Image (cartoon, rainbow, N blue to C red):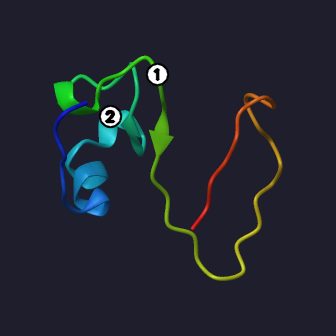
Amino acid sequence: MNKAKSGNLNNLVNDHPETKNWVVGHFIKHNNFLKTDDLEVKWAVHKKGDIKDGNLADYSAKTLGF
C-alpha cells in the first residue's frame, strides 16, 4: 500500500453497522482502501472487567489487544 488513512474507528463502525465492527477485510464494500484478502481487523471497545467467553470461530486466528 502506498497510502495512509487516519480517523476515528468508532465513527467508522458507527457509520457502517453492516460490517459488525469489522474495519479491514475482504467483505468491506464501502471503502476500497480497507478492502483486502490479506488481513481482517475488527474494532471493539471493552469495558474494564469484561471477560471473553472463549467461544472463537477460528482457533488458528491471532488476537492483538491494546
Left or right: 43, with 47 as reference point: left
Query: Disc 1 designates what residue?
Result: 38
On residue 27, which mark appears? Answer: none
Does 59 sit above or below residue 49?
above
Of the pair 13 and 33, the residue shown nearer to us: 33
Say if mark 1 contacts mark 2, CB within 8 Å.
no
Mark 1 surroundings: few (<14), some (14-19) or many (≥20) residues within 10 A: few
Instruction: Give the x, y percent position of residue 14.
Output: 26, 54
- Give the residue furthest to the bottom: 48
In the image, taking residue 34 as reference, residue 42 lies left or right, namely right
Counting from the top left corner in percent of width and height, residue 27 is at: 37, 20
Q: What's the residue type where badge 1 is placed?
A: Asp
- Tell me the number on the disc at residue 18: 2
Residue lying furthest front: 2
In the rendered view, would you say 57 is above or below 62? above
Neighbor class of circle 2 (other Cα within 10 Å; few <14, some 14-19, many 20+) is few
Q: Which of the 4 quarters of the picture holds residue 56?
A: top right
Q: Residue at x 62, y 54 (%)?
A: 64
Numbered disc 1: secondary structure: loop
State the image coordinates of residue 29 (x, y, percent, origin top left).
23, 22
Q: Earlier in the sequence, mark 1 or mark 2?
A: 2
Viewer-closest of 43 and 66 = 66
How far apart are the alpha carbons under marks 1 and 2?
A: 21 Å
* Residue type of the residue flagged with mark 2: Glu
